[in-house]
Image: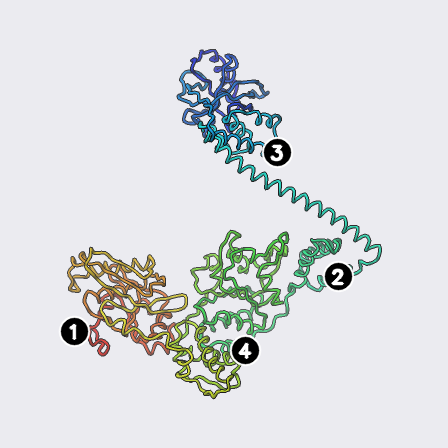
Amino acid sequence: MNQASASEMAPLQEMQNVPLPEDGLILLPVREVVAFPGTVFPVSTGRAKSIAAIQQAIRQSRPVGLLLQRNPAVSDPGAEDLFRIGCTANILRLMTSPDGGHHIICQGVTRFRLIELLKGPPFPVGRVLSLPDVTSHQPQVEARFLHLRSQAAELLSLLPQSPAGLEEAAHAATEPGALADLAAAYTDIPIEERQEILETVDIAARLDKVSKILARRLEVLRITREISEQTRAAFDERHREAILREQLAAIQHELGEDGGNAEEIAQLGEAITRAGMPPEAEAMARKELARYARLSDAAGEGAVLRNWLDWMVELPWQVPSSQPVSLIQARGILNADHYGLEKVKARIIEFLAVRKLSPESRAPILCFAGPPGVGKTSLGQSIARALGRAFGRVSLGGVHDAAEIRGHRRTYIGALPGSIVQAVRRARSRDCVLMLDEIDKLGHGIQGDPSAALLEVLDPEQNSTFRDNYLGVDFDLSRVVFLTTANMLEGIPRPLLDRMEVISLPGYTEEEKLEIAKRYLVPRQLRANGLMYERLRFTPPALRLMIRSYTREAGVRQLERQIGAVLRAAAVRYAEGKPAKSKLGAEQVEAALGAPLFENETAPRTSTPGVATGLAWTPAGGDILFIEASRAPGKGRLILTGQLGAVMRESAQTALSLLKAQAGSLGLEANSFDSLDIHVHVPAGATPKDGPSAGVAIYTALVSLFLDRTVRSDTAMTGEISLRGVVLPVGGIKEKVLAAAAAGITRVMLPARNRRDLEDIPESTRKHLDFIWLETAGEALRKALQRAERRKGAAAGNSES
């Protein structure tokens, strides 16, 4: 408590003789002290008013009322700053300190409730209501009393040291309320729980609360005692083993049988010399080697030290001599390993050219981003071959512990270096090409953020002094060529993405898939299925059938699985000795794979008003989706289904608002929408969908519904619309156009501001499509809707309005 100054005490001492009301109780606000009836406790105070109150109580032989402050920081508490229930106490002894503070020993008497603070006295005086315990002999109370007594006895037996006389006082207690107060007073519990028990006037409820607290405390003490006994036993056992090991080592030394360990130490010393470590790492290795030499073979720490020394001597500390980079050879390797991807190959050649001209330069970290199966990982292997370096790969998918990157400390059982150091060790080269696969699928758990640990690894300015927790010394990663792969950039934290140069790998066209199947997939599956020497070959129509009717993906992974399925069916015939054709055509493909999995369903789906074909981007490439709209009598509601995200829902609402605004120009009555419920559905319902690019398609479907005019079945569209009917640009144009071409679409309507993306679309795809560039939503209606009188012949005519 605050110490009172002489200037504060003087006027208070003069007013101490002011008479007090007989029904008034001198109050003593306290901090961090809760007094209970029947207990003896110390109180220290230094506040001027509190000292005056104590002196007045002693002079008049009056008790004091102790009330806990709600906020300990308040120096002059009022009624609102005090709890309403406290404990009256008699002052048994007073002691003063040299600094003016007062220390009193009090004995609690009974509970009281503060009714009001009286005005006039120079210190707190209140009118109170006494709350004595009501003696109860009910069976429920007696049972709780006996249970609490047994708990208190067990608690005292578990405590290493308890206050003198406390055990006798607990056994001598005959009143349930007194025993509960005694147990609460001398048990280590928070101040808030103490005050709660003091405010519990009901005896049964008070016994229950104290019993729960003692049960919790007993559980902790039991566990503590068990751990202490186990620790003591383990320490005694280790001490005995240490003495025996020392005796064994002395006996072996006397018998001359410790030569094997000396030979091992010498071999490790030579390995440290050959490793070519930096001075700091070598000094630490030799220090740990000397400590290892002093340990006996049976020492538990010896295995940990030996494992650490093995890691240190096997790491590639020295930089091998760099080989010259041949760009001609690099182009040949890239063209031999990958078909298409011309822009990606050109950027890789630029990357290799810089490495050739400046081997010591800090090259950028390349991130290959694209859908699954387009060859991101194999591009890293091709770069390693072109550079003539070892290749290593670290899969980051699902990693949620920062120690997986930085390693575990040696103090943990089974500790190992992080995955980066492990990959460099496997590659046996400090200038290897290291690919960090699936960097967008890093997790985040309670063990730390692995993406934050990668910030140092992928920063050329910092990774020269990368420190793995297991090694405990710096390891230079600046000569490692880091490459990363990702499917979606949205999953990569922004600081980590900022350290990488993103190279996008789009999906393949049908022609590219056909060439990839001929050059790579078919020969690889022939070898995998033991048919390399059977001269089996696929006809081009058979490959096209698998591409169009059995796969729908941006990459070629599923296509390779289907090729393998057809070849396995052929392998069965060869293994059974049955005649088989050397050329596999469409008939063999259908016999092995069954009915086609995909078909062009655009014409049947769009043969009725209210259905439009949209284009979507997914992590696996582009795809087409159908926007279906219907109307029914109702109250003007807009119903959206198909697992639509918030942005796509807003696009649907914008499309409906635009339709209502243009109702007059379209020949519709504006008030007709109030009596109709409009339902917009986007199959498939089990797949979540989001994004603004379906705005044009939703608007076209709604206009088609209300004008009773179908949308052309050979037309697909994408683009965001505004409330003014302006078509805004969207992303993923290449993937969407490729998906439209694969689905048999011949006319694609795109935002006019996306003309810049036309050059990214392969020439083989562009020449089979008719591109329509949209400035406004009205242009989409003129190009997409068919004439109403010719709707029944839509499949044949497809004329424009």
With 301 as the anchor, is 637 left or right in this view?
Answer: left
Dot 3 or dot 2: first in sequence order is 3
Residue at 25% of width from left, 61% of height from top?
679
* Residue 634 x %, y %: 20, 57
What is the C-alpha distance between the residues marked 3 and 2? 54 Å
Q: Residues within 10 Å of mark 2 (few under 14, many from 20)?
A: few
> Considering the numbered disc 4 on the image, is that residue within a helix, a strand or a loop?
helix
Dot 4 or dot 3: first in sequence order is 3
Out of 269 and 57, give the one closest to the viewer. Answer: 57
Q: Which residue is mark 1?
A: 789
> Considering the numbered disc 2 on the image, is that residue within a helix, a strand or a loop?
helix
Q: Residues within 10 Å of mark 3 (few under 14, many from 20)?
A: few
Out of 669 and 545, give the one closest to the viewer. Answer: 545
Q: Amino acid at mark 4?
A: Gln
Residue 430, compared with residue 238, is above or below; it is below
Q: Which mark is residue 157?
A: 3
Residue 667 shows in the view: yes
Q: Residues within 10 Å of mark 1 (few under 14, many from 20)?
A: few
Q: Residues within 10 Å of mark 4 (few under 14, many from 20)?
A: few
Q: Which residue is mark 2?
A: 264
Residue 74 shows in the view: no
Q: Which residue is mark 4?
A: 329
Q: Hey, which quadrant is residue 585 in on the image? A: bottom left
Q: Quadrant of the C terminus?
A: bottom left
Dot 4 or dot 2: first in sequence order is 2
Residue at 63% of width from left, 67% of height from top?
428
Out of 287 and 177, give the one closest to the viewer. Answer: 177
Q: Amino acid at mark 1?
A: Glu
In this rendering, the label closer to the viewer, 3 or 2: 3
Say whether marks 4 and 3 touch (CB < 8 Å): no
